[in-house]
Amino acid sequence: MLNESASILVLDDEPLIAELLSELLSISGYQVTTCTRPDDALAVAREGDFDLVLTDFCMPRMNGRQFYLALCSIRPDLANSVLFLTGGVLNSEMEAWLESMALPQMLKPFTMKSLQHAVTDALIRAAELQDREGSACSPE
């Protein structure tokens, strides 16, 4: 689905960032569900109908890679529908993984405009890949 009524699951361990993302995305017309803990986001993703998952990459309990793999195990249809939010400081292993997976990223700090562009691009990418490849998660 590519329109402003798309449903987005937001995961960020920083409550203020999660709230800001929710408000900005809601202003743009998206339906937003927000979580601050990866386990909660996985539980919500299991039951919900989402067009995009916007997740922080660096989190204390579960990093973005671990979250992505856990998400894929319960919702392989969301494998191409993930947008990572990063502060730009990742170790070389995580940078290599992100690059090898060709998953979209958005850098912190962000503006309303950069958020809108990143989300729109991620939704377009997800729709195109779903049409072309179906749903399949890549291995670790």
Image: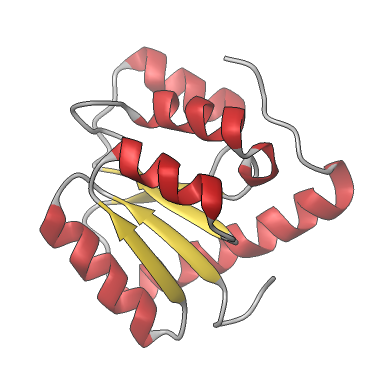
Which quadrant of the figure contains the N terminus?
A: bottom right
Query: Is residue 101 in sight in this rendering?
Result: yes
- Residue at the outermost right position: 132
Count numbered badges in the picture. Answer: 0
Query: Is residue 84 in sight in this rendering?
Result: no
The way the protein has been coloured in the rendering is: secondary structure
Q: Is residue 31 above or below residue 85?
A: below
Tell me which corner region of the image, top left, top right, bottom left or bottom right, holds residue 92.
top left
Residue 26 x, y percent position in the rendering: 36, 81
Residue 45 x, y percent position in the rendering: 49, 48
Q: Residue at x 25, y 41 (%)?
A: 37
Q: Residue at x 19, y 44 (%)?
A: 13
Residue 22 x, y percent position in the rendering: 30, 70
Taking the image as shown, residue 121 lies to the left or right of residue 45, namely right
Q: Is residue 38 above or below residue 82?
A: above
Q: Residue at x 67, y 64 (%)?
A: 124
Residue 91 x, y percent position in the rendering: 29, 18
Tell me which corner region of the image, top left, top right, bottom left or bottom right, holds residue 29.
bottom left
